[in-house]
Amino acid sequence: MPLVPALLALVEQFKDEPLAEVTKHIADRVNAGSTVSAAFKEYPDVFSGLFVNMVAAGEASGTLEEVLWRLAEILEKRLHLAAKVKAALAYPLMMVIVATAVVVFLLSYVVPGLTQIFLEMNRPLPWPTKFLISASAFIKTYFISITILICMAIFAIAAALRNKDTKLILDRFKLKLPLFGNLFLKLEIARLARTLAVLLASGLPILGALETAKGVVQNSFIAEAIGYVKHLIAKGDNIAAAVRKTGLFPPVVLHIIAAGQAGGNLEDGLFSIADMYDNEVEMSAKTLTSLLEPAILLVMGVVVGFIVLAILLPIFDINQVL
């Protein structure tokens, strides 16, 4: 199909979706003589720099169809990988939320009624029971204040993430987290490698590809490292040497890039890196889930067991007296 009828067919397909209006405007602009990339550029909230630059390269080289296929592939891979990670971590996160809610409910509503009976007996209580009574009283008294503080902390973190310097510190800290840090790094390397490979295969020069890929990376610390790599390459360093100087990427990545650069097939090397780390992220997420689930259950069991023990100890004492 010619380009404009193809865009209009998409408008019909999207129907009342917000993208329908955007696509209709793009079709009108192209019909009036504009390039697709220029029309895309008018909607930065819809089409990223990656889209615009790749489509522009495809138009310049006459390979727009191939570029669009590559864009579809890279987005599908990215969504698939993100969905795998989210699905793997969703269950442990839900367990933490439910466990916290159960403990707060017990301490706020169940425990006070039982402990009141013990207090009215005017008998010495074991330390677990005393601790439970104090914790229950604290939560019941300051529940609203604690909730407000948690909400304020969430808003403060969200505001801090909008600050460039603070986000850089937090993103660097994320990469050093036990268990999760390596997963975050692999996820970003997979995204970065596939994006660079597609950009280079579409005909973009390395400096332009790095600048576009930098905008795709979500971790600002890694994005800053990509900017440093671009600076070194512009000064005359080769790609592998520039990447090595960041001290951020694993040795296997450096060797694959060096081999691909020496053989003149850097894109194939980057695709291999992306596929390798896609698989590793999926496996790491599954492993992390298998470790977190029993750990959460253990912590849950200890906390609930402590509550039950603190309630039963005074009852045992009463039975012994009777």
Image (cartoon, rainbow, N blue to C red):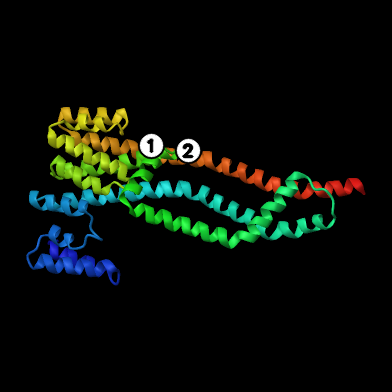
- Residue name at image x 75 percent, y 44 percent: 127
Q: Position of residue 178 (x, y in %)?
A: 46, 37
Graded by Cα atoms within 10 Å as few (under 14), some (14 to 19) or many (20 or more), the crowding at tag 1 reads some
SS at badge 2: helix
Residue type, numbered disc 1: Glu
Graded by Cα atoms within 10 Å as few (under 14), some (14 to 19) or many (20 or more), the crowding at tag 2 reads few
Task: Say left or right for 246 vs 152.
Answer: left
- Residue name at image x 19 percent, y 33 percent: 239
Rendered view: 31 above or below 172: below
Instruction: Report how far apart the C-alphas of labels 2 and 1 lie in the structure.
Output: 10 Å
Task: Say left or right for 264 vs 12.
Answer: left
| Extreme residue in the right direction | 322
Rendered view: 260 above or below 100: above
Residue topped by disc 1: 280
Residue topped by disc 2: 287
Rendered view: 22 above or below 319: below
